[in-house]
Amino acid sequence: MSPPALHFPPAMRAALQECRGDAVPARSSCRNQGIASSHADLPGCKMTFTITPAARLTQAFFCFLLCVPWGSSCPPSCQCTERAGAKAVLCSSQHLEEIPKDIPKDAVFLKLDANSITRIPSNAFRHLSHLEELDLSRNAIEKIDRAAFKGVAAGLRTLDLSSNRIRSIPKEALLMLNAKLRLANNPWHCECALQEVLWEARLDPDSVQDITCHTAPQEEYVGKPLLQVLDAGVNLCSMRQRTTDVAMFITMFGWFAMVIAYVVCYVRHNQEDTRKHVEYLKSLPSTQNPTETISTVL
């Protein structure tokens, strides 16, 4: 069965044929039909072609539709679809090593999970002003730049960074970020910087218990959920302050000991030089002044 024929209005059909380079007959004059024409002296039928300004405008419009790509492009390794009336860009499990550069600007949902991305550079999503959900879970992310989420912080509602290789994250990267964060299953280094991040961030309640200390200043905290450590009354920032104070005290004591040792060595060296000089003077032959000799004789 042949497909049904498409019927276009005359102006549209003229524009389409013009785009293909076809000619469109506008009117004809034929001697055998008895129609008055300036070409009546020519044998047979003479075709003349006329394109009105309206037809030219319609032609230009439809040529634009046919010749220019319509809609935003989609990265080759991703699939762009609609979800709840909004554009979703799905790039899951595509062996990506970095964030694609050509993500459509009108993307609302972006899934980059289960890839091999190692870093989130500055301004990586700045052009995605409509972005609301960002999934970066199950990658190999180790470094997050301070301006990684600049431009999307205000509108982002969900940010999933779980199951990566993140040990620490700069607090500046999460400034003005209202998104619900998932940070579970990362090899976190539990220190003051991470504690400050947790104070500032909105954590997903379902994943808080899975934020575990992979390393910590105190060995007793390793392997424990960070929330459990903090609930026990531990303040990692005050611990760092105490460590800094102890380090400063040790440093000052070391400098003081060096100064004392230098002074002691200097005094002993001068005493040794003085002793040697006195012994030298004693070893010299004694000579008496002639005046003193005469006085002794008288």
Image (cartoon, helix red, strand yellow):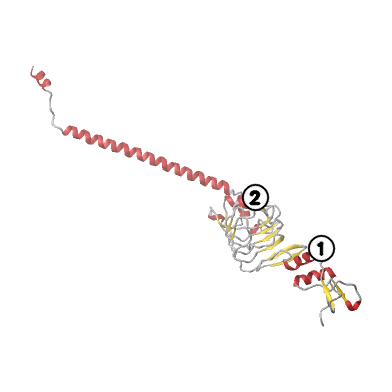
Q: How many labels, in total?
A: 2
Q: Secondary structure at mark 1?
A: helix
Which label was assigned to residue 53?
1
Disc number placed over residue 175 in the picture, else none: 2
Disc 2 element:
loop
Relative to 291, say whether 82 is above or below.
below
Callout 1: few (<14), some (14-19), or many (20+) C-alpha neighbours within 10 Å? Answer: few
Q: Is residue 186 left or right of residue 42?
A: left
The numbered disc on residue 92 is none
Q: Residue at x 31, y 36 (%)?
A: 267
Residue 205 rendering spot, x and y as whole percentages: 69, 56
Give x and y (percent) for residue 190: 57, 54
Residue 2 rendering spot, x and y as whole percentages: 81, 81
Seen in the picture, residue 127 relative to 65 is either above or below; the reply is above
Viewer-nearest of discs 2 and 1? 1
Q: Residue furthest top?
A: 298
The local crowd at label 2, few if under 14, some if 14 to 19, many if 20 or more residues have their Cα within 10 Å, is: some
State left or right for residue 257 relative to residue 283: right
Q: Quadrant of residue 225?
A: bottom right
Please state which amino acid type lies under the numbered disc 2. Answer: Leu
**Residue closest to the eye, 113 or 34:** 34
**In 3D space, how far apart are the residues under numbered discs 2 and 1 (Cα atoms)?**
57 Å
As shown in the figure, which amino acid type bears the numbered disc 1? Answer: Pro
In the foreground, 174 or 121: 121
